[in-house]
Image: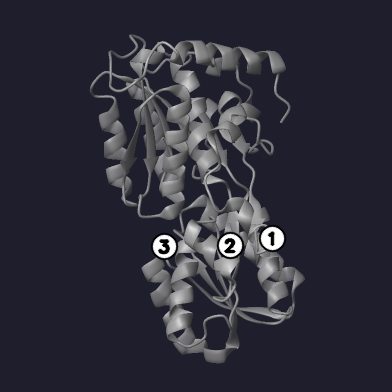
Amino acid sequence: MTRNATRRALIGVGLAAAIGMTSLAGCSSASEDAGSGGAGGNAEDVTAYQGVRSLSNAYHANWVEGGELFGEWAGVEVHTITDEADSQRQLSQIQALGTSGEIYALNVDPNTSSDTEAIVNAVTDAGGFVVTQWNKPDDLFPWDVSDNWVAHISFDGRTSGQEVSEALFEKMGGEGGVIALQGILDNVPAKQRFEGLQNALEDYPGIELLEDQTANYSRSEGLSVTQTLLAKYGDQITGVWAANDEMALGAVEALRAAGLEGEIPVVGFDAVPEALEAIQEGDSGYIATVSTDPWWQGSAALSLAYQAATGEIDVSELSHEERAFYGEQTVVTADNVTDFLEAPPLEQLVPDLEDPWARSQGPIEP
């Protein structure tokens, strides 16, 4: 997306001036006009939060690390809340953020699409500012709710799902049987990624989808489901597709236990460190994953919410394209894996912190 250079410069300079006055570590009084959006507060009055599923999930751990890089740049303390995939717990935690009267900025990954409306309404009621990622109902957009729901960021799983499936099918020689491990079923990326797999299957008539089952983004469930399907289909399975790396790594464990490690190619999503290491080493059968750059997700999106909370961005002046957009994603294979093994240095992220739309790949259309 082409951004207005003047606005970009003013945001960067204005935020730098605001955050230069203080190091944020706690809470203060809330805006008198809670829920109105647009006005924001002084930098010293704003608390920054990340809301993720679990720090035991390497993808979300990298997301949180990205938030810490934002905090280092902005001179603020970033707090993390985790919900362990419990939607009610996630909502209760977010509802609690506003009870102390603080103005806050929140960058959150709702567990499912059906969770999003309650989350953004809770933030609006408290006078906070939130950027959501990945999950929302197809017919609900930030401008339908309030200026407190600053933006929604997602990634087109249909595109990445098809591309990583094609990498798997090419490794399989264009023929054979594949099993698919799906994520949480009421989850936008899970649905889109599986749709991408189905689109790829149309172009590879020699590949048969033997069966798909949900493993809920869990490594342990990925292990058990793969073991079940191995027992059912045996040597008909010549490829494994998983909607995230945790499930794919569970599948690798199942293949290892069956004496098949390295013989059956496996693909996943999220580019977690263990998956990247497996791709680099090349002996486990793990051939590809997809990176959405969780460090960027944790830093640039939090910067967007924070700039709205401090008033450096007036949400009411943003276009629809600036409030619902797709981010960049990359299929990672042995050819480019070294580019994704470590967190980027802060100086590499600074342009994205100053301009959170710099990597936009276009609008999420109604």
Spatial distance from mark 2 to mark 3, Cα to Cα?
13 Å
Q: Is residue 353 above or below residue 178?
A: above
Q: Nearer the viewer, mark 2 or mark 1?
A: 1
Image coordinates of residue 87 in percent, x first then y, are 33, 47
Give the quadrant of residue 320. Answer: top right
Tell me residue 350's x, y (percent).
58, 29
Q: Is residue 218 above or below residue 19?
A: below
Quadrant of the snapshot with the N terminus: top right
Question: As shown in the figure, which amino acid type bears the numbered disc 3?
Answer: Asn
Residue 220 on image: x %, y %:
37, 69
**Number of dots carrying numbers:** 3
Spatial CA distance of label 1 from label 3 is 22 Å
N-terminal of the pair, mark 2 or mark 1, is: 1
Q: Secondary structure at mark 3?
A: loop
Q: Quadrant of residue 45?
A: top left
Residue of label 3: 216
Residue type marked 1:
Glu
Task: Name the spot of residue 103 as percent of width and height, x first.
Answer: 34, 19
Instruction: Indicate the secondary structure of the residue bearing disc 2.
Output: helix
Q: Which residue is denoted by mark 2 in the rendering?
A: 194
Quarter occupied by the C terminus: top right
Q: CA distance from mark 2 to mark 1?
A: 12 Å
Q: Looking at the rendering, which quadrant does residue 40 occupy? A: top left
The residue identified by callout 1 is 163
